[in-house]
Each structure stands twice: as C-alpha cells, then as structure tokens.
Amino acid sequence: QLQLQESGPGLVKPSETLSLTCTVSGDSISSSRYYWGWIRQPPGKGLEWIGSIYYSGTPYYSPSLKSRVSISVDTSKNQFSLKLSSVTAADTALYYCARLHLSGSFDYWGQGTLVTVSS
Amino acid sequence: DIQLTQSPSFLSASVGDRVTITCRASQGISRYLAWYQQKPGKAPKLLIYAASTLHSGIPSRFSGSGSGTEFTLTISSLQPEDFATYYCQQLNSYPQTFGGGSKVEIK
C-alpha cells in the first residue's frame, strides 16, 4: 500500500525558506512511472497546485510561485522535497504531497502538514 | 491559467437526495477533469478522473459527465458519509488548477 508522509518545520519566520520533505513508502520513486507533486491549502480555503516532478525530469511549477519554489527528488531516500523562499503570512497553509495518477490527477495523498509563517 | 468555477459553492441536502455539482472551465479542456472529496481534517480523495471514470474503490452512486467547458458531478443518493466539500481539477494544461469547492451539508 503506497503511503506518503510530509515532514518539516511547522513554523517559519517571514522572509525565510520553507522546507518540506515527502517520504514515499510502498513504491520506489525511481522505478515508477509516476510524477509526484505538492499542493497547498490555506486555512479554510481551497486547493492550490504548487508543482510536480518526475524522478528524472524537469519539474513543473505554478507560475505564481515559480520565482520562489524548488522541487527536487532524492531517489536514495525515496523522498521528494519542496523549498519555498521569501515566505510571507500568505504562505501559511496545509501542505500536501501527492502522487500523480497516469490521468494527471492526484490519487495518493499524504496527511498534510501545517506550516505557519510568523515571527 | 484556466479558471474553474464551481456551483453551487454551498448546498444543503438530505440523505437520499440526488445532488449535482457543476464545474465550468474558462476554456475547453476536453475531458481532462478530476473530482475530489475532502472531509474536515483530511486530505482530498480522488473520486473521478477523465471526467467520468470512477477511481478504484469509489461507490457507484458517484458519477461524472461533461466535456469541453462544462462538467458535472452527481451523487445519485446522498449517504451520511458524503457530506463533505467537493473540488474539481483541470488536468489539460499547466498550471493545474482547482475549482473553489462545493460544500455539501446536511439539511
């Protein structure tokens, strides 16, 4: 059974860099045919796609975040990571990692991790 | 970016009701649309992809239809566990975008 688990600091100061890791179990990132992605959800609001990556390919980013975001894969640890720089209070959200189904939709999700941006 | 507009944003319904939620895209997306269900404190759950294909394990009371710019999610007979917020997502082009959500509450 595929499982994804987000980890990282729950509190980040304004102007600093948010860093999260998603650990995948039950499947190998490097042997699968899937893309992996990050989605966020501000408290009480809707879903926003951040970006997606294939283990050996170029990542795709949301244009609204592209200047600040970086997604990478560590196949040795079966993990992929998110970095978002120069954060503000507007980046406070529940951050989810997920697997992209072959259709392009997200079929497996982590439980989500709340990141608060505050001094 | 392709904008997705869901309606209604909120609806009140009873167990056993037939419920329909609409998702309209700002430009044609063929059938590249997915639907998700999200309950409070939980991650979204994939219900339907490719506009009408039921994801594995999803009850048959859920169905999807549409193509181009207009899509619908139908729950044929609402069950207590179906009270949740539903989101559509377009997969036609990057950036992938989500609708604003439709919350289904108990009448």
Image (cartoon, coloured by chain):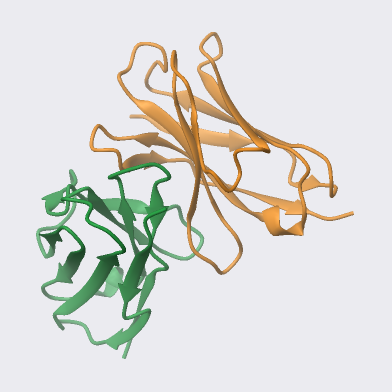
Chain colours: A orange, B green
**Is residue B39 positioned above or below B57 on the image?**
below
The answer to which of A67 and B63 lies nearer the viewer is A67
> Would you say B77 lies left or right of B33 here?
left
Q: How many marks?
A: 0
**Is residue B71 positioned above or below A49 on the image?**
below
> Would you say B87 lies left or right of B77 here?
right
**Is residue A50 positioned above or below B81 on the image?**
above
Which residue lies most toward the top here?
A: A76
Q: Residue A19 falls in which quadrant of the image?
A: top right
The answer to which of B3 and B6 lies nearer the viewer is B3
**Is residue A43 positioned above or below B50 on the image?**
below
Which residue lies most toward the bottom here?
A: B107
Q: Residue at x 61, y 44 (%)?
A: A65
Q: Position of residue A71 (x, y in %)?
A: 57, 28
Q: Residue at x 19, y 66 (%)?
A: B70
Q: Position of residue A100 (x, y in %)?
A: 35, 35
Q: Residue at x 40, y 15 (%)?
A: A28
The answer to which of B86 and B61 lies nearer the viewer is B86
The answer to which of A71 and B2 lies nearer the viewer is B2
Q: Position of residue B42 (x, y in %)?
A: 46, 56
Q: Quadrant of the C terminus of chain B?
A: bottom left
Q: Position of residue A47 (x, y in %)?
A: 48, 57
